[in-house]
């Protein structure tokens, strides 16, 4: 099983590859990094994940990359970790919410649905770049 995450300061978007279909899961709301890493570790164990795909921005975003790498080191996971470029994944996810009204769009941002859609985009990139090669 493969799971992708979009690590943010307030939320961690989650998506999973299930029978060849990419599905958004409920985002992890971050109260602090220890709680969030524990929640992600538990999810990885519960879903029996073998590959964790993590979105990272381009090297220009040094602080963000350091923060993401540090967070992932806190996660208790023995499987394979793959970093995939996440540039524009949030913008693409936001475009997928165009059908919602302003109020519902704001709610989708606040409750983490946008972050999980972004994780779907990251997982899609992983599938295109890594799985297609094999």
Image: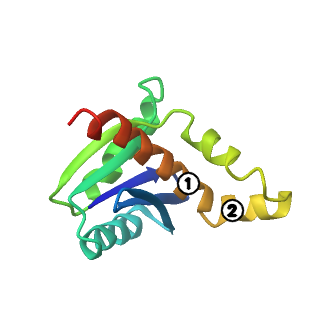
Residue 134 or 77: which is nearer the viewer?
A: 134
Q: Quadrant of residue 130?
A: top left
Residue 81 or 96: which is nearer the viewer?
A: 96
Query: Is residue 30 positioned above or below 70 on the image?
Result: below
In this picture, residue 39 sits left or right of residue 76: right
| Picture coordinates of residue 106, whole percent (x, y) | 76, 59
Distance Cα–Cα, label 1 vs label 2? 10 Å
Query: Is residue 83 positioned above or below 44 on the image?
Result: above
Query: Few, some or many C-alpha atoms within 10 Å of disc 2 (few <14, some 14-19, many ≥20)?
Result: some
Disc 1, SS = helix
Q: Residue at x 59, y 62 (%)?
A: 112
For the N terminus, the image quarter is bottom left
Q: Which residue is mark 2?
A: 108
In this picture, residue 30 sits left or right of residue 65: right
Q: Which residue is mark 1?
A: 117
Seen as rendered, the residue at the extreme right is 102
Q: Residue at x 53, y 60 (%)?
A: 11
| Picture coordinates of residue 50, whole percent (x, y) | 20, 59
């Amino acid at each position: 099983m493969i799971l992708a995450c979009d690590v943010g300061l307030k939320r961690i978007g989650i998506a999973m590859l299930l029978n060849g279909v990419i599905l958004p899961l409920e985002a992890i709301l971050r109260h602090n990094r220890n709680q969030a890493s524990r929640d992600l570790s538990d999810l990885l164990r519960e879903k029996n994940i073998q590959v964790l795909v993590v979105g990272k921005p381009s090297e220009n975003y040094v602080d963000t990359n350091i923060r993401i790498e540090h967070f992932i080191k806190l996660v208790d996971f023995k499987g394979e970790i793959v970093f995939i470029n996440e540039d524009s994944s949030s913008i693409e996810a936001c475009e997928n919410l165009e059908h919602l009204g302003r109020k519902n769009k704001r709610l989708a941002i606040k409750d983490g649905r946008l972050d999980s859609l972004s994780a779907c985009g990251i997982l899609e990139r992983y599938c295109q770049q890594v799985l297609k090669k094999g």
